[in-house]
Amino acid sequence: MADSSGIGGGTAGATGGTGTVHEEYSFACMKCGHGWEQTYDIQHHLPPDGTPFVTYWTEGHRVPSPLTNPTCVNCDGHLLRIMRSGRVALAERAMHT
Ligand SMILES: [Zn+2]
């Protein structure tokens, strides 16, 4: 329960393989100005005879990649600015300590 090793991923990207990482994205709609954040569980798959791919999950539901077909939850617009907020938070925390 108190495992705090989920962010930053000590093994992610080291030697490949599968795993789930948590990424938090901030979205900003260029059309209506609506902004929100969403955390994704991103599962990395590495089939032995295929091309590696990832699946995105939010709250236990599989969802399309937010990077390929983003949709504004307010106006259904598709012109969004996406930022990965998790990395930013980690960087800010490192600077303050
Ligand atoms: Zn919008």
Image: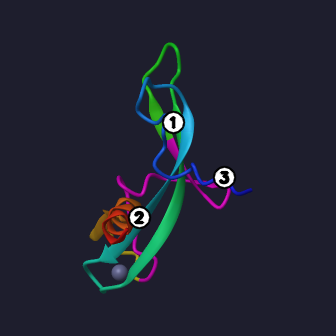
- Residue displayed at 66% across by 52% down: 3
The residues bearing labels 3 and 1 have C-alpha atoms spaced at a distance of 21 Å
Q: Secondary structure at mark 1?
A: strand
Label 3 or label 1, whichever comes before in sequence order: 3
Q: Quadrant of ligand 1?
A: bottom left
Crowd class of label 2 (few under 14; some 14 to 19; many from 20; radius 10 Å):
some
Which residues, given as a range, are shown in magenta? 55-74
Q: Secondary structure at mark 2?
A: strand
- Circles 3 and 1, Cβ within 8 Å, touching? The answer is no
Label 3 beta carbon less than 8 Å to ligand 1:
no
**Relative height, residue 51 to residue 78 (above, below):** above
Q: Position of residue 2 (x, y in %)?
A: 70, 57
Label 1 or label 2, whichever comes before in sequence order: 2
- Residue displayed at 51% across by 25% down: 17
| Quadrant of the image containing the N terminus | bottom right
- Judged by depth in the image, the label closer to the viewer, 2 or 3, is 3
- Residue 25: assigned label: 2
Q: Is residue 1 left or right of residue 49?
A: right
- Residue 77: assigned label: none
Which residue appears farthest toward the top when viewing the image?
49
* Viewer-proximal residue among 60 and 31: 60
Judge whether residue 34 is colored magenta.
no
Task: Name the residue tied to disc 1.
Answer: 44
Q: Position of residue 39 (x, y in %)?
A: 52, 63
Task: Name the residue tied to disc 3.
Answer: 3
Label 2 beta carbon less than 8 Å to ligand 1:
no
- Judged by depth in the image, the label closer to the viewer, 3 or 1, is 3
Q: Is residue 59 left or right of residue 53?
A: right
* Viewer-proximal residue among 68 and 84: 84
Q: Amino acid at mark 2?
A: Tyr
